[in-house]
Amino acid sequence: MNNKILVTGGAGYIGSHICKALSNRGFLPVTYDNLSKGHEWAVKWGPLITGDLHDTEKLCDAILTHQPKAVMHFAASIEVGESVEDPSAYYYNNVAGSLNLVRCMITTGCLNIVFSSTAATYGVPETRLISENHPQMPINPYGMSKLMVERIITDCNEPNGIRHMFLRYFNACGADFENEIGEAHTPESHLIPIVMQAAGGQREKLFIFGDDYDTPDGTCLRDYIHVEDLASAHILALESLLAGAPSNAYNLGTGTGYSVQEIILAAENVTGRAIQRDVHSRRAGDPPILVASSAKARQELGWKPTKSLDEILASAWKWHCKQNNI
Ligand code: UDP
């Protein structure tokens, strides 16, 4: 029986963790990645096709050759700040690339997609916890590009038979507990790996982007979710889709927000090292608070995030030490 899943962006941070989870669950992940940000060393659980989402021939050929049961779509540009500076690159990579993928899926008859979406599609929250029916009004091109892809896929449900699961992540972080894979972006822009660099001495200090937000300590609150918890939700969503569940969207977060200051303090505690920091001006495109209600995923998918902030930071630190020979 064919148990293949095409994983675009499978050489990247989240994609590679999902490939490992797929493999543990008896699927064969076939990675399709242009390696612009991903790493060949992260593709360990199935074949790698080095290709770009814009390469229609290669992409359709990958689907025709492997006949995957579904596509899990991670390949994208993912940095809020960069998207504000270079929006057209984000619309080209994320929207045009995904549109090409959807068109290849339609022409080849591979109609199931699990799409890596984001809390950034919601914009500034109107409620303390964000649920799936919160208005989607992104405040940066990254969030807008992901929302546009959600719309494209949804529009293709009826006429083309595409079926989807949208998984809207809050802040993915941490590393594989077996320390085989982890976050490795160059340059790094995400808070937790930057905190690790400052703890490990690979960076003199970190900058806190704004301490004048309307939050308890003035720094932004985010909902940090371990990448292995994300992976378990992906497996549940995929299996539900393959079992015939209707198209749906789920938030993936823990429901708890931590401020930038709290993350730094917790990281000092977990690593046992002092972390130098300075306050910088706000980063464009940052909402003050993003915290998920993941009640729907818990109820409908039976998902439960299990990793604590300390486990997130400890796994990130262990991975950082391995990468940097600490
Ligand atoms: N942040 C920060 N300094 C950094 C990187 C991030 O203060 O060097 C803040 C950022 O402004 C946001 C939070 O940390 O409030 C999480 O940012 P990250 O880029 O990790 O994820 P995002 O929320 O943008 O998806």
Image (cartoon, rainbow, N blue to C red):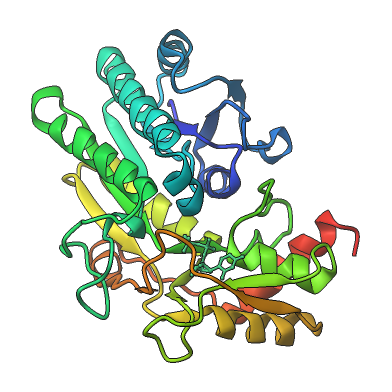
Q: If the image is split into quadrants, where does the N terminus sit?
A: top left
The residue at the far top in this view is 57
Residue at x 59% of width, y 60% of height: 190
Residue furthest to the right: 325
In the image, residue 97 sits, relative to residue 207, either above or below, namely above
Q: Quadrant of residue 292?
A: bottom left
Report x, y in % for residue 51: 55, 19
Residue 3 higher or lower than 186, as above or below: above
Nearer-the-camera pick, 304 or 98: 98
Residue located farthest toward the bottom when viewing the structure as drawn: 216
Task: Please name whichever residue, 166 or 211, is drawn nearer the observer in this view of the structure.
Answer: 211
Residue 285 appears in the figure: yes
Residue 3 vs residue 284, the one in the foreground? 284
Q: Is residue 192 left or right of residue 100?
A: right
Q: Residue furthest front?
A: 281
Q: Is there any visible trace of residue 315 in the rendered image?
A: no
Going 29% across and 33% down the picture, which residue do you hit? 112
Residue 145 to residue 176: above or below: above
The number of numbered discs placed on residues in the rendered structure image is 0
Q: Nearer the viewer, residue 70 or 38?
A: 38
Measuring from the top left, give residue 118's x and y in whole percent.
36, 54
Image location of residue 236, percent across then percent down: 36, 54
Residue, x 79% and y 64% (percent of image)?
Answer: 203
Image coords of residue 92 (percent x, y): 40, 28
Q: Residue at x 54, y 74 (%)?
A: 307
Question: Quarter holding the C terminus?
Answer: bottom right
